[in-house]
Amino acid sequence: MKPLSVKNNLRQVQTFLRYLIAGGIVSPDVLARPIRIKVPDPLPRAMEPRDVKRLLCVTQNIRDRAMILVLLRTGMRIGELLQTRASDVHLDERKILIWVGEKNRTGRVVYLGEDACEAVRAWNQKREAHKPLLFYAQGRSSMSYTGARRLLGKYLEKANLSHKGYSLHCLRHTCATELLNAGMRLECLQQLLGHSTVEQTRRYARLTDKTREEEYFRAMARIEGRQSHDRDRGAGEVPTVFEEAQLLDPYDQELHEYAATLSTLDRRTD
């Protein structure tokens, strides 16, 4: 079993034990030392930009292309998309109303890119107007999660991407990552994704932290430049006094300056 499954099962056991304790059936000592399971916090899995292009190139079916583009541009969960009614989509304003969020039960508004709007308009010309849901399977009034998963799997295989392990939820991760890379603020992305706390959204910042990336490569350039300079110097050549001061770490540098100051004070005293 995966750690999250173990944690959920353990929570149910602990709830049952508290019920038994409240009824005086077992001793409270049973929960004196609670067991805690640390659940991994992996990075969100986003599709690579070239893989997104390959996927869209092979998705020619009007309905399927509209579904994939809406997921890629809005960051909606697949359950939310499958429950979206045609009346919830406002193409003139380029937005979709989600009346009840799938996880936190909180409604929100998501927005559509121009390519997604065009795909939905094309689908609206083909879809059966009397069916209330925006997307549905052939011969039915709705589409199941399994049907949507198979739909994506078919196109991933057609694009030779099935070996990469992409899922429907990866489309949501891809939307969030691309928006952050484009400069969207974390708090704004939180509202679009329907996260209860900004900490949930902050996971995507670990993929897109340009400041940390720039700091690293700036520091590495200094390190590599210094090492290159050391290699250029002769094998028996002693560093100059100025180079020696630069090679000191911040703590030794402070001691060096402090000793120099004391020496100056001593000379003045003499």
Image (spheres, rainbow, N blue to C red):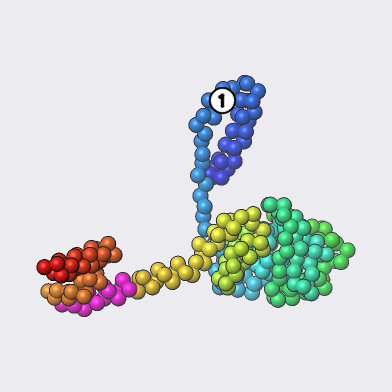
Which residue occupies 18% across, 77% down?
233
Please tell me which residue lies in front, 251 or 182.
251
Q: Which residues are magenta?
A: 222-234
Tag 1's secondary structure? helix
Residue 263 within the magenta-colored segment of the rendering: no
Please tell me which residue lies in front, 239 or 207.
239
* Residue sitting at the far front: 269
Amino acid bearing label 1: Pro
For the question of whether residue 143 can be seen, the reply is no
Which residue occupies 82% across, 73% down?
125
In the rendered image, the quadrant that contains the N terminus is top right
Percent x, y of residue 147? 71, 57
Percent x, y of residue 152? 66, 63
Percent x, y of residue 194? 67, 58
Please tell me which residue lies in front, 4 or 203.
203
Asked whether, in this view, residue 257 is left or right of residue 79, the answer is left
In the rendered image, the quadrant that contains the C terminus is bottom left
Name the image quarter holding residue 120. Answer: bottom right
Which residue occupies 77% across, 73% down?
93
* Residue sitting at the far right: 130
The residue where tag 1 is placed is: 28
Name the image quarter holding residue 150. Answer: bottom right
**Label 1 Cα neighbours within 10 Å, binned few <14 / some 14-19 / many ≥20:** few
* Residue sitting at the far top: 25
Which residue occupies 59% across, 41% down?
8
For the question of whether residue 59 can be seen, the reply is yes
Asked whether, in this view, residue 134 is left or right of residue 150, the answer is right
Residue 224 within the magenta-colored segment of the rendering: yes
